[in-house]
Image (cartoon, grey):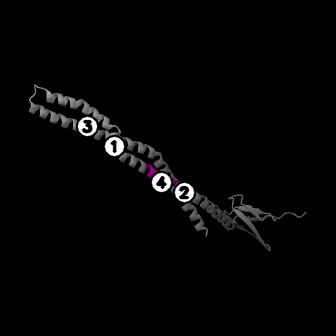
Amino acid sequence: MSEMRLVSLKCPACSGNLDIGPAIETFACGYCGANVRVERGGNIVALNLLTEAMDGVQRGTDRTAAELAIRRLSQEAAMLQVEASNRLVEHDRIETKWARETAAVKPSDRLLPMALLSAMVFIPAISILTMASWINPAVALVLSAFATAAVVRYAWLSLHNQQQNLRTEKMEMRDRELEPILNAAKDANKRLELVNSKLHAQRQIVDAHD
């Protein structure tokens, strides 16, 4: 059996001393871990790094992974765009519905009964003052006019204030209904922004390996 002859060479990456047997073709340096290829020609034995070959394989792997990621992220971005668009449509629909309901608020919703009640209380009192024999007719007429004006103003202010309260109530109901829609739209836009950022990064990887 012939004796195995070892050749002492230095690692092309770290210059560490390596003993190379005749059957070794490629190996990892025991000092730095570099991938090394053994090249033999005649009586010459040399060591070369496998970096370029490995880099080529890595570049191909990175490009393939980036292309797959671009396909997946593009689909995700399209879905998020549809979701954000649907949220905006829903938002506009709710806005329109509540704008119509708020504009339709009339005093007759709750307020006419209050005005009638005021008239039922004050007008008889005015009539009694007018017919009272111990009051000067001119004074009674003036009091009657002032009392009538006061009743009308009170009724009008009551109607106006209550109408404003009704509209405010409807606007608060609108805001409560819109809040989850707006939050969902903001969330979809944030996720879309993140996906677009990832898409840009993956496209840069593909462009770098062209």
Residue 89, disc: 4
Residue 160 at what x, y percent from top left? 28, 41
Mark pair 4, 3: CA separation: 41 Å
N-terminal of the pair, mark 4 or mark 3, is 4
Residue 195, disc: 2
Q: In the image, which is nearer the foreground, mark 2 or mark 3? A: 3
Which residue is drawn at the image coordinates 10% and 31% (left, top)? 137
121 or 23: nearer the viewer: 121
Q: Quadrant of residue 72?
A: bottom right
**From the viewer's perspective, is residue 128 above or below residue 1?**
above
Q: Quadrant of residue 176?
A: top left
Which residue is drawn at the image coordinates 15% and 33% (left, top)? 144
Task: Write the start and end of the magenta stretch as one range.
Answer: 81-95
Q: Amino acid at mark 3?
A: Ala
Q: Which residue is mark 3?
A: 155
Q: Residues within 10 Å of mark 1 (few under 14, many from 20)?
A: some
Do labels 4 and 1 touch, CB within 8 Å?
Answer: no
